[in-house]
Image: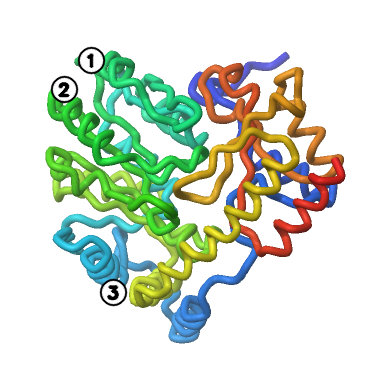
């Protein structure tokens, strides 16, 4: 046997279970409700803008931290969506290769080895590896079924003199939770008490149903210590474009821009031109977006409940996280998901993917519904047969 060249960091986590389930689904010819990508087209304005930019030879490097027209568009759209939130496109924005790069660039820019990062679980599976790759140690705080609230005492106990940042994802993947003002006030108080940064992933900001989305950066006490991560992917149905951004105070943005430059140099220039077109879409676009996703949510959650899953209907994002005890008495969601993708041929993500201790997610399964109604109906028919 030769030397094991794997770093201790890389050895500390597995490949993405979400992507694995998508591969298994493709191999079995199933319906993919595992990976959260739309199977319907993006707005035509974006496609036309991208094609026009390529034809106009906007094919070389943009400014490393983002094309000016796109940064100006992000600032204007932010101010329109959240009156009073004025973002300086010259000093408070960094355009990245998707929200994924935005989060790792941010963590690399603000944490050092020995620091700790507080992460809510269940979590989107990138956050803990991002912390590890940055040299930090994740500290986990659980969101509790059925409303996915956190225990304030447990959260307080996670903070200490080594805590550098807390990651907040609202609307939340995988639970669909939208953090309330009262919860964000608790987080704000702790961040101020321990002088901690708040790193927020708000990629589902416009996919909300019965409660409004409140950006943590608009909560008193968090204005000057929040990095907001966002992207085109979910709101505009272009997950393959990999165009995201951060919004943060100038000193934090300067650090993120340096790390981003050496990670990826910059996001695709013609797609940033299309991003500027996305930022100019009217308010009616976002209203229709939420209405369309509400219809998809209600269809899928109704089917899941009829089949026998214990479902909490999400307030935001486009996932349903279910308890599987009635259909999987063994409470082995990893094995159960692998059976489900073969027969009846529906891909979901086992809850084990969303917890530091996989056993905490052993009885949970996540279904994604950013799909055409006919796709969801096909999945419903298969689940009904099973």
Q: Which residue is mark 2?
A: 194
Residue depicted at 37% across the width and 25% down the height: 150
Q: Nearer the viewer, residue 230 or 317?
A: 317
Give yes or no for contact between labels 1 and 2 (Cβ–Cβ under 8 Å): yes
Residue depicted at 60% across the width and 17% down the height: 359
- Name the N-terminal-most of marks 1 and 3: 3
- Name the N-terminal-most of marks 3 and 2: 3
Report the side of 285 relative to 33 (left or right): left
Numbered disc 2: secondary structure: helix
Q: Nearer the viewer, residue 353 or 326?
A: 326
Position in image of residue 73 (x %, y %):
28, 71
Q: Which residue is mark 1?
A: 160
Report the side of 111 relative to 26 (left or right): left
Numbered disc 3: secondary structure: helix
**What is the CA distance from the residue labelled 3 to the residue labelled 2?**
38 Å
Residue depicted at 34% across the width and 76% down the height: 280
Give yes or no for contact between labels 1 and 3 (Cβ–Cβ under 8 Å): no
Q: Nearer the viewer, residue 218 or 18?
A: 218
Quadrant housing the N terminus: top right
**What is the CA distance from the residue labelled 1 to the residue labelled 2?**
7 Å
Question: Residue 234: in sight, yes or no?
Answer: yes
**What is the CA distance from the residue labelled 1 to the residue labelled 3?**
42 Å
Q: Residue 69, labelled with which disc?
A: 3
Position in image of residue 126 (x %, y %):
48, 36
Q: Residue 242, labelled with which disc?
A: none
């Amino acid at each position: 046997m030769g030397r094991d060249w794997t770093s201790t960091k890389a050895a500390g986590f597995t490949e993405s279970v979400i992507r694995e389930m998508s591969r298994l689904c493709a191999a079995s010819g199933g319906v993919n409700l595992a990976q959260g990508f739309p199977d319907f087209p993006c707005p035509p304005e974006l496609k036309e803008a991208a094609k026009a930019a390529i034809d106009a030879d906007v094919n070389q490097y943009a400014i490393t931290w983002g094309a000016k027209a796109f940064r100006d568009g992000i600032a204007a759209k932010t101010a329109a969506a959240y009156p009073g939130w004025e973002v300086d496109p010259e000093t408070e924005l960094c355009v990245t290769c998707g929200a994924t790069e935005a989060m790792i660039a941010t963590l690399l820019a603000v944490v050092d080895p020995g620091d700790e990062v507080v992460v809510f679980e269940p979590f989107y599976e990138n956050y803990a590896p991002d912390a590890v790759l940055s040299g930090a140690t994740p500290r986990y705080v659980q969101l509790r079924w059925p409303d996915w609230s956190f225990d304030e005492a447990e959260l307080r106990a996670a903070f200490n003199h080594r805590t550098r940042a807390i990651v907040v994802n609202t609307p939340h993947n995988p639970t669909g939770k939208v953090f309330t003002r009262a919860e964000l006030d608790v987080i704000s108080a702790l961040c101020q008490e321990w002088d901690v940064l708040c790193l927020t992933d708000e990629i589902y900001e416009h996919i909300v149903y019965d409660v409004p989305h409140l950006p943590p950066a608009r909560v008193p006490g968090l204005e000057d210590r929040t990095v907001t991560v966002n992207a085109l992917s979910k709101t505009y149905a272009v997950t393959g474009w990999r165009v995201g951004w951060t919004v943060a105070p100038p000193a934090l943005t300067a650090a993120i821009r340096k790390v981003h430059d050496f990670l990826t140099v910059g996001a695709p220039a013609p797609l940033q031109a299309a991003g500027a077109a996305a930022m100019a879409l009217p308010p009616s676009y976002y209203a229709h977006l939420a209405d369309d996703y509400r219809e998809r949510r209600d269809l899928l959650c109704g089917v899941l409940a009829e089949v026998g899953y214990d479902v909490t209907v999400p307030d935001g994002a486009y996932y349903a996280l279910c308890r599987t005890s009635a259909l999987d008495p063994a409470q082995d969601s990893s094995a159960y998901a692998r059976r489900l993708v073969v027969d009846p041929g529906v891909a979901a993500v086992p809850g084990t993917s969303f917890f530091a201790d996989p056993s905490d997610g052993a009885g949970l399964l996540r279904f994604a519904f950013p799909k055409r109604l006919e796709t969801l109906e096909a999945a419903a028919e298969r689940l009904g047969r099973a």
